Image (cartoon, grey):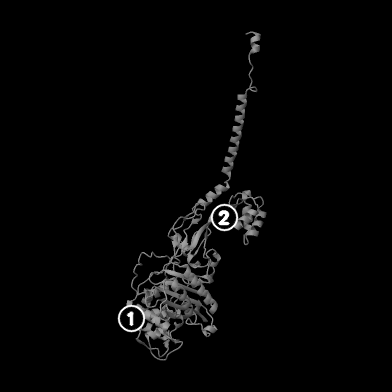
Amino acid sequence: MSAAARVTEPVITAAASPRSRSRVLAFGVTLMFVAVAGQLINLALRHEGASTIRVSMMSTPSGTLARPDIVDRNGRLLATDVQMPSLYADPLMIQDADEAAEQLATLFPGLNVRELRRNLADRTRRFVWVRRGLSPGMAQRVHNLGIPGLLFVDEIRRTYPAGRLGGHILGRVDIDNRGVAGVERYIDEIGASEAAFGARLSARAPVRLSLDVAVMHALDEELAGAMTRYEAAGAAGLVLDVRTGEVVASVSRPGVDPAIAEEALDPARIDKVVAGTYELGSIVKLVTVALALEGGKSLESMVDTTQPLKAGRFTIEDLHPLGRPMTVGEVFVHSSNVGAGQLALSAGLEAQKAFFQKLGLWGPMRTEVSPGTEPQKPAQIGRIEQITLAFGHGMAVTPIQFAAAAAALVNGGTAVAPTFLARDAAVPPAKGRRLVSPRTSALLRDIMRRNVTDPVGTGRRADVAGFEVGGKTGTAEMAVSGGYRKKAVLASFLATFPASNPSFLTLVMLFEPKGQDVTAGEITAGRNAAPTTARLIERVAPLLGVPAKLL
């Protein structure tokens, strides 16, 4: 090949090729992305991100539950779930654990600063709860601190629009929205709650209670007024449908706010209607008279009440003895302890015990709100116990189970099971087993009405024009360990209306009322619980569809 030919051949080098330069650049960019991706994968394998933490936290089987709403019988909201921010920390992102803990303590009084500081300083952790269920305002205040590593996640939180109204019945939930008491626990027991993945609210139908918020409010106000009027230490009451067993209202004061766990743990705030057991005094004479009537006596049968009853070293006397024999009806109207004791002795011990058992007063009564509380009964029953049981002394039961027994005695004689769930109005209630005869039930209704209308009846101050009230008083000394507190009583009034054909029963209880000018210094139920019942029935009867009529 000639020299000239060699000179004219083009000389191509890598530096001079645009295509080669592009390939090198593309290869370099690819290496860079591979390196970045590798580092991200490495970080992901070594540490969870905030979003991963949130997903894993909210999807664990032990996480938060989504709950159905709770409403009253008319659909008014009593409990619901809402989404609320909860505060947690990622210790790996916290720059100064001491400063973060101190600043958080200024927003959350009662925060365990030492424990929080230790947790925030632990960089092997990626998740530490700080405070759950914050209001939007408080969440903003935390955000304004500007501390890296403080993060929020939305959670489900239970709220109670009615506050303390119905608090005992509704119960409460724990920090994970799991029911621990009352209707809330019942909801979990029947499987009506569900695992909440994320902050998803329940789509299930509301749980409809038998309670009526308007009646509850009236009962609560009347009990609060009575506590003030008679300087009582506490009060409780209920309104029960004697036909269906539905509890239309139940109030115990002092009340509890379901959103404040500390209140539920306060012994002074026990649910006196469902959980407490008490000697109820002379309202138990309703049972004793029913026993006598079932045994063949009539309201006109005579009872020897001329002398006090003796039992060993004990003597049973009447507060206002008539000094003559009484009829069974008079024993009830005058609330004679001697007469009640004589009726029990006449019936016999086995018949008396069997009747208490038949009425459901000898064992615990379960409801949707409570598994039941065991009644307190005498260890052994001799003559004195047989006599005192006849007028409500020596045995303590929950008010709701006594109300259920009384409902059966006045509704025609059939058992009802108390319920806090609304019954389907289109489905007739199942007929309960017969506890007493229709004759006995009719006579009891008659004598309860007479006790309110008779000028000497202990329940005369419970009369309400137009509403045909019947009832019975009970004044019992408050039991304490080893005995009774003198001049400290539980004053109760059991009422039905309309008395001739009852639809509803009320029970009003005042704990340790004081004598007042308006009561002539007395602390008996006829002076305080009876007039409180009159005020209550006058308010709630129209709400319950019981119209006033000329009597």
Image check: 469 left or right of 143? left
Residue placed most toward the observer, 461 or 312: 461
Residue placed most toward the observer, 486 or 498: 498
The span from disc 2 to disc 1 (Cα, nearest Å) is 66 Å
Q: How many marks?
A: 2
Quadrant including the N terminus: top right
Q: Which residue is mark 2?
A: 85
When the figure is inspected, residue 302 is found, relative to residue 294, above or below; the finding is: below
Query: Picture quarter containing residue 410?
Result: bottom left
Q: Can the viewer see residue 64 in this picture?
A: yes
Q: Earlier in the sequence, mark 2 or mark 1?
A: 2
Residue 307, label in figure = none
Query: Picture quarter containing residue 10?
Result: top right
Q: How would you rate the neighbour count of disc 1 (Cα within 10 Å): few for under 14, some for 14-19, many for 20 or more?
A: some
Where residue 82 appears, as percent x and y from the top left, is: 52, 57
Regarding mark 2 in the picture, which secondary structure is present there? strand
The residue lying at 49 percent from left, 62 percent from top is 79
Q: Which residue is mark 1?
A: 295
Residue placed most toward the observer, 11 or 541: 541
Quadrant including the C terminus: bottom left
Contact, mark 2 vs mark 1 (Cβ under 8 Å):
no
When the figure is inspected, residue 498 is found, relative to residue 144, above or below; the finding is: below
**Of discs 2 and 1, which sits in the foreground?**
2
Amino acid on which the number 2 mark rests in the picture: Pro
Where residue 525 appears, as percent x and y from the top left, is: 48, 81
Q: Can the viewer see residue 400 in this picture?
A: no
Amino acid on which the number 1 mark rests in the picture: Gly
Where residue 183 appears, as percent x and y from the top left, is: 46, 64
